Amino acid sequence: MKGKKIMYVGDSLSLNNFESLICLIHGAIPGIKYKQKATPLNFTVTFQEYEVQVILFHSNFLVDIEEEQLGRVVKMKSLKSGEIWKQMDVLIFNSWLWWTRTGRQQPWDYIEKLDGEIVKDMNRISAFEMVMRSWAQWVDKEIDPNKTKVFYQGESASPYHYRGNYWGKSADTNCKSEFIPLNETMIFTTPSQCTNITKNILS
């Protein structure tokens, strides 16, 4: 691990795992010195003594969203951030959750499909599959497996935070005061469509 650059690319699930790795390193080596640096694109924690960088690169869709005259456009074939990603020794990707967002929570106005057609919306599962194929093609073409290890974290789905009935509390309870992890699988026991799509693309 010494001298390596490790980058998480994705949404809040990537953030959770990024923070967990930072805590594991800090806990394994008490008193280890580190410094933090934030930019509009990423957040980096550097453990100076070991020259290890752990980086979070926020990208909900993995592909680019660009401001154009007609509005914010998801560009299914565009991964400009890949120039940064290629510099890493380890890459851990994830995506999916933000494809389910609509209305004010939706951070785009149009989608530019792989063939260049621009649409106002489309089936989100199909959109996810197209983007994942575009991302997988980028990995195959641009990443040197002898230099960079690539992992896909899985679909962006974590247990509910605001429905206490999933862990034996009242339904209107959130997880704010919970400190003990669950010991059993309570939900997501059946692979979802996007999980199956990802497995097919990666196989």
Image (cartoon, rainbow, N blue to C red):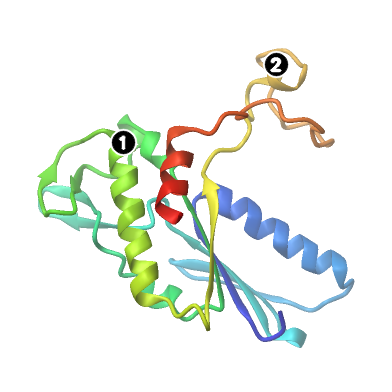
Give me the residue at 72% from left, 30% from top.
185
Position of the N terminus, as image quadrant, is bottom right
Q: Kindly identify which residue carries mark 2.
A: 165
Give me the residue at 57% from left, 29% from top.
190
Q: CA distance from mark 1 to mark 2?
A: 29 Å
Neighbor class of circle 1 (other Cα within 10 Å; few <14, some 14-19, many 20+) is some
Residue 92: x %, y % from top left: 55, 62
Can residue 97 be seen at all in this image of the molecule? no
Residue 75: x %, y % from top left: 23, 56
Taking the view exactly as shown, the residue that stands out farthest to the front is: 203
Residue 104: x %, y % from top left: 33, 33
165 sits left or right of 120 in the view:
right
The answer to which of 90 and 33 lies nearer the viewer is 90
Give the amino acid type for the residue marked by disc 1 in the picture: Arg
Answer above or below: position of 6 versus 20: below
Neighbor class of circle 2 (other Cα within 10 Å; few <14, some 14-19, many 20+) is few
* Mark 1 or 2: the one toward you: 1
What number is the disc on residue 166? none
Answer above or below: position of 129 versus 182: below
Answer above or below: position of 70 versus 196: below
Give the amino acid type for the residue marked by disc 2 in the picture: Asn
Task: Indicate which disc, 1 or 2, sits on the residue closer to the N terminus.
Answer: 1
Quarter-of-image position of residue 77: bottom left
Give me the residue at 32% from left, 64% from top.
137
Mark 2: secondary structure: helix
Count of residue discs: 2
What number is the disc on residue 124? 1
The answer to which of 102 and 61 lies nearer the viewer is 61
Taking the view exactly as shown, the residue that stands out farthest to the right is: 30
Q: Are marks 1 and 2 in contact (CB under 8 Å)?
A: no
The answer to which of 46 and 145 lies nearer the viewer is 145
8 sits left or right of 163 in the view:
left
